[in-house]
Amino acid sequence: MAMESSILKSPNLSSPSFGVPSIPALSSSSTSPISSLNLRSHNHRTIPLTAAVKFRISCSLSDSSPRRRPDYNPNRISDPNYVRVFDTTLRDGEQSPGATLTSKEKLDIARQLAKLGVDIIEAGFPAASKDDFEAVKTIAKTVGNTVDENGYVPVICGLSRCNKKDIETAWEAVKYAKRPRIHTFIATSDIHLKYKLKKSKEEVIEIARNMVRFARSLGCEDVEFSPEDAGRSEREYLYEILGEVIKAGATTLNIPDTVGITLPSEFGQLIADIKTNTPGIQSVIISTHCQNDLGLSTANTLSGAHSGARQVEVTINGIGERAGNASLEEVVMAIKCRGDHVLGGLFTGIDTRHIVMTSKMVEEYTGMQTQPHKAIVGANAFAHESGIHQDGMLKHKGTYEIMSPEEIGLQRSNEAGIVLGKLSGRHALRDRLNELGYVLDDGQLSNLFWRFKAVAEQKKRVTDADLIALVSDEVFQPEAVWKLLDMQITCGTLGLSTSTVKLADSDGKEHVACSVGTGPVDAAYKAVDLIVKEPVTLLEYSMNAVTEGIDAIATTRVLIRGDNNYSSTNAVTGESVERTFSGTGAGMDIVVSSVKAYVGALNKMLGFKEHSSILSKTPLETNNVPA
């Protein structure tokens, strides 16, 4: 008897012509000392536990050998169980408020995504600004041409709206990659047609058909089409427009739940119905893109894959517009843990050992901290505080863990046997950082080592949380336009706080300024402003102690907005959006930590300004095709 997951499929939603793929039948031939126990499935039929034990109870590294990634073909996958991972951290993820990334940071993340093994990197929205265009182009030229020993190289994708100017700009940015892709979209739901586009269904079909054909005419053989707000679109209209873009040359059809309104059973049935009723669907790849407004993006994505989608669109840490997107680490690990037994044998090409480092890099560069209880990568994901849980873990780790931390790039600190202090050397520091998921080059390690020694002189024991804060402060910082050298603060109840700050510019020239303020941080920030002379508005300020005790390292995060209006175009709404810039700092002195964070945010903004001014003098490389 086949037992189906009630989360992935509702029995009353099956299409008579196409059912959601059934879960493989379970053998009940094995014997067990607990054979008298029974499990009950969602349809209330009883099955023996001897069948259930065939399920994988953990995602151990030794559970299965890696399966080969199929050769890339835009509209076909040779292995029907392979699921392509389309990462849109650099495009949809960067639309999160405060998540502005510099070109260097985007390139760093793209390289890490390639190390992770994602199939497609949506590098950005090239028409948003010249900075976005150049960032996508740089990624296409570098990451998009780096082929590993197995022949893997990621597809580099650029997003565009359904107009010639956007599509041409996207092609000019991605065409340098070995495997370029254009991703174009237009809304299809009644509410979007009426209020946003103000167009008829026939007009939208004509636009979609012509723009996909235009993308192919530029020489792009890999074109993805998305009917925006597909989750609320009329089914028959969806089948029609998707059939037309297939005839026009689309190779991937992405089905977005743009507002995160569907439930897993509904989204799975949507994919199943599209697979059944769209003419020509057998010659393209079906993709999912699920927003997290109801907290169901991961469940919806898995349901879509279970129903026949063979590409999943995700972001690192689930960042994105509003409540975010489906999280790469959650979707990938769910497929790894349950793909064989519940999802009909699905698998991905992701090297999960790089998940933690990728997560930390995105977290630090965007300034968007993951909550401690975040699945897979949260600080508490492998923590066990309950006495019952601890007892079980000591007896057998499989009692309360379905995956080992080593699978995602972590090592257990209590098994390493190393306690770091002032006598620890570089080798011990490097080993511990590797166990925490950080792989640093020699230069980064050297800079971090001296910061580590300074902290170790003041604390008997340097904790993992201290190390993470130091890595954030030393490694994941923007290119320095200004660098904090020294500062002196006088504050208290007897008068205004005063601050003297010394900064060095990019040429090494030192600048000193003094100021007063309502408190030590206010005085220090005003002194920095006198030197930098760049008007900004402080939007957010937060500080945390990374460990207990009065000698703890303090981490500070700030979010600023430049008063000179640094903006870009929102891909979905087409509106001009003011960019904000985040900065982080760490130190045992809370004011020093605060100033480092402020200078870091200013550096990110000034780096963006400098890059944009250079690009403004350089015309885009286009073929001047009229829009």
Image (cartoon, helix red, strand yellow):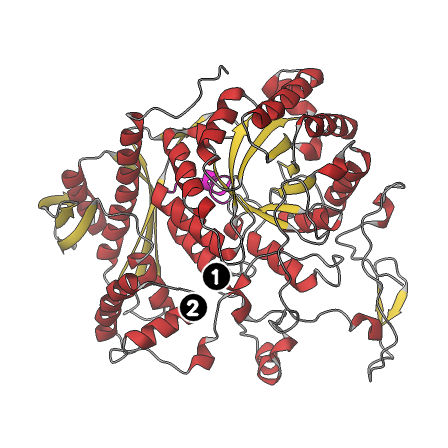
Does residue 253 appear left or right of residue 514 in this picture?
Answer: right
**How would you rate the neighbour count of disc 1 (Cα within 10 Å): few for under 14, some for 14-19, many for 20 or more?**
many
Question: Which quarter of the rendered picture does the N terminus lie within?
Answer: bottom right
The image's mark for residue 436 is 2
521, above or below 452, in the image:
above
Q: Residue at x 89, y 67 (%)?
A: 46
Asked whether 507 or 72 is in front, the reply is 72
Give the residue pinned by disc 1: 356
Three-letter amino acid code of the residue under disc 1: Val
Q: Give the x, y percent position of residue 34.
A: 82, 81
Residue 522 tag number:
none
Residue at the spot 19% in from the left edge and 50% down from the top edge: 483
Q: Residue at x 25, y 80 (%)?
A: 423
Left or right, 77 with respect to 548, comes to right
Between discs 2 and 1, the one toward the N terminus? 1
Which amino acid type is marked by label 2? Leu
In reply to whether residue 92 is colored magenta, the answer given is yes
- CB of mark 2 within 8 Å of CB of mark 1? yes
Camera-nearest residue between 398 and 239: 239
Q: What residue span does the magenta drawing correspond to?
A: 89-102
Is 328 located above or below residue 393 in the figure?
above
Label 2: element kind: loop
- The residue at 63%/42% (across/down) is 290
